Amino acid sequence: MNKCIVGLQWGDEGKGKIVDILAEKSNIVVRYGGGANAGHTVVVGNNKFALHLLPSGSIRPDVKCLITNGVVLDPEVVIAEIEKLEKENINLKSRLLISENTHVVLDYHKKEDLLREEALGKNKIGTTIRGIGPCYADKVGRSFAVRMADFLDMENFKTKLQKIVDYKNQYFGAIYNAEPMNADEIYEKCKVYSEKLSPYITDTTEFLHKAISQKKSILFEGAQGSLLDLDHGTFPFVTSSNSSSLGMSAGCGVPAKYVDEFIGVIKAYTTRVGAGPFPSEQENDTGQYIRDRGHEYGTTTGRPRRCGWFDAVVVSYSVTIGGIDSLALLHLDTLAGLKELNICKAYTIDGKETTFFPSNLAKLEKAKPVYETVPGWEEEITEVKSFDDLPENAKNYIYRLEELIGIPIKMIGVGPKRSQTIFR
Ligand code: GDP
Ligand code: IMO
Ligand code: MG
């Protein structure tokens, strides 16, 4: 069985936890998109791992971990992660594979991300400043792109890098009046990256297709969420890749027909980091209650996450465009103690009701949520092990979400640990 795990809201749904759990019965986990903007949390006993680039299967010692062509890889971050895991006696030497076609995030990408956001002022996107947009822009632009394969030929790379940095210096100087960067300094860092990462660089597409023909079990790990998808999300307040499940095939060279199940990960409410529309947002005591109980602060940037009610319009849209088969619903425990829960089941736009998510910003800004109110539950549920033992109102909440979304909720999170997961 091959499965693809993908976030259906604005990211941070709990993909890391689900991938870690499913990795137990998988041979291979593939990170196919995004970069160090992602922060995937895996909790094992008292240990908490926040992974930005390494697949969330890394903690399982027998799992092969792939970072494929769709990722934009910051070498500094991945090296730090490998070394951090080594300190915990988790070795990736023979089981991490990085595609030679993976694009590389370098200092000038992070610098440009920061300069642009600063220049935008109150109109900024609220990016993670991890150089994601500028690196993907270089990928699309081609002429100044750096890929992992470049680290295998450092002689040629030196000349190439000098040209790129010359260009960036002229550009940043003219547009942002920025101080020039030193190509030699960047090259010296790249020499270290090359030494440390060359052993992992390979053809991951070939590896994956061999694995498919050998009937290995593969998990494809999405990053971000479907509403942050460059084409189908809340543009321009999105990330720079196809972060819905639609990005999977292009991101690793495996057609969707080899995926047996697309699993969408959702929270029992909604969160978002960064700017952009969020119809069911609660900038009030309810939002703060969720933030406090759910520890809703960014894994990558530490920013407080914006919090709001569950939005079935958002999730139904992500299911529809993503071909999602089943759901993992996390953070059900966070909602305990709220007398009533609101579920956004439609929007009104200019007086007309719609249940299909309008990705167009002008329409979305006018969207007013239509809520259905259901009773909440008082009891803490973090120790509940089976669906039947959940409070009646928690069960009813799940039934209602399934009705609105139209596909089954097969896994339920009642806490961050592996053991705090109910399978149905
Ligand atoms: P990801 O980016 O989708 O992997 O999600 P993050 O790791 O950024 O954020 C999810 C957070 O929720 C992490 O701190 C997890 O440890 C935590 N978490 C995951 N599932 C649950 C759950 O069911 N209940 C609670 N309370 N926390 C959870
Ligand atoms: P995971 O994989 C939540 C958001 C940023 C910003 C927008 C663009 O942990 O779910 P970028 O740095 O990508 O150019 O920022 O996208 N964003 C995320 N939000 N979870 C993520 O990843 C995110 N990755 C990017 O906050 O609004
Ligand atoms: Mg995250």
Image (tube, rainbow, N blue to C red):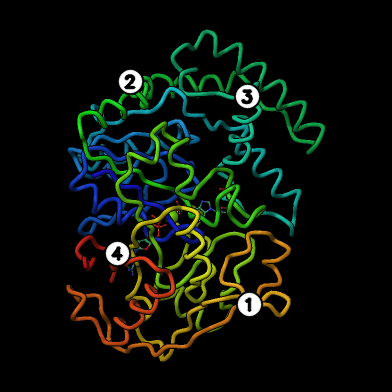
What distance separates the C-alpha of mark 3 from that of mark 4? 41 Å
Q: Choose top left, top right, bottom left or bottom right for residue 228.
A: bottom right
The disc, 2 or 3, on the residue closer to the chain's N-terminal end is 3
The disc, 1 or 2, on the residue closer to the chain's N-terminal end is 2
Q: Secondary structure at mark 1?
A: strand
Q: Does the numbered disc 1 mark a residue whose Cβ is under 8 Å from ligand 2? A: no
Q: Around disc 2, counting alpha carbons within 10 Å, would you say few (fewer than 14), some (14 to 19), or many (20 or more)?
A: some
Whole-percent x and y of residue 235?
Answer: 65, 53
Decide if residue 259 is on the left or right side of residue 110: left
What is the number of the mark on residue 353?
1
Q: Secondary structure at mark 3?
A: loop
Label 2, on which residue? Answer: 199
The kind of residue on which mark 1 rests is Glu
Q: Secondary structure at mark 4?
A: loop
Between residue 184 and residue 91, name the one nearer to us.
Answer: 91
Relative to 130, does residue 197 appear above or below in the rendering?
above
Quadrant holding the C terminus: bottom left
Q: Choose top left, top right, bottom left or bottom right for residue 353.
A: bottom right
Q: Secondary structure at mark 2?
A: helix
Query: Residue at the location (37% across, 20% down)?
Result: 198
Ligand 3's quadrant: bottom left
Q: Around disc 4, counting alpha carbons within 10 Å, would you say few (fewer than 14), some (14 to 19), or many (20 or more)?
A: many
What is the number of the mark on residue 416?
4
Label 3, on which residue? Answer: 142
Decide if residue 28 is on the left or right side of residue 307: left
Q: Are marks 3 and 4 in contact (CB under 8 Å)?
A: no
Q: Nearer the viewer, mark 4 or mark 1?
A: 1
The kind of residue on which mark 3 rests is Arg
The disc, 3 or 4, on the residue closer to the chain's N-terminal end is 3
What distance separates the C-alpha of mark 4 from that of mark 1? 37 Å
What distance separates the C-alpha of mark 1 from that of mark 3? 44 Å
The disc, 1 or 3, on the residue closer to the chain's N-terminal end is 3
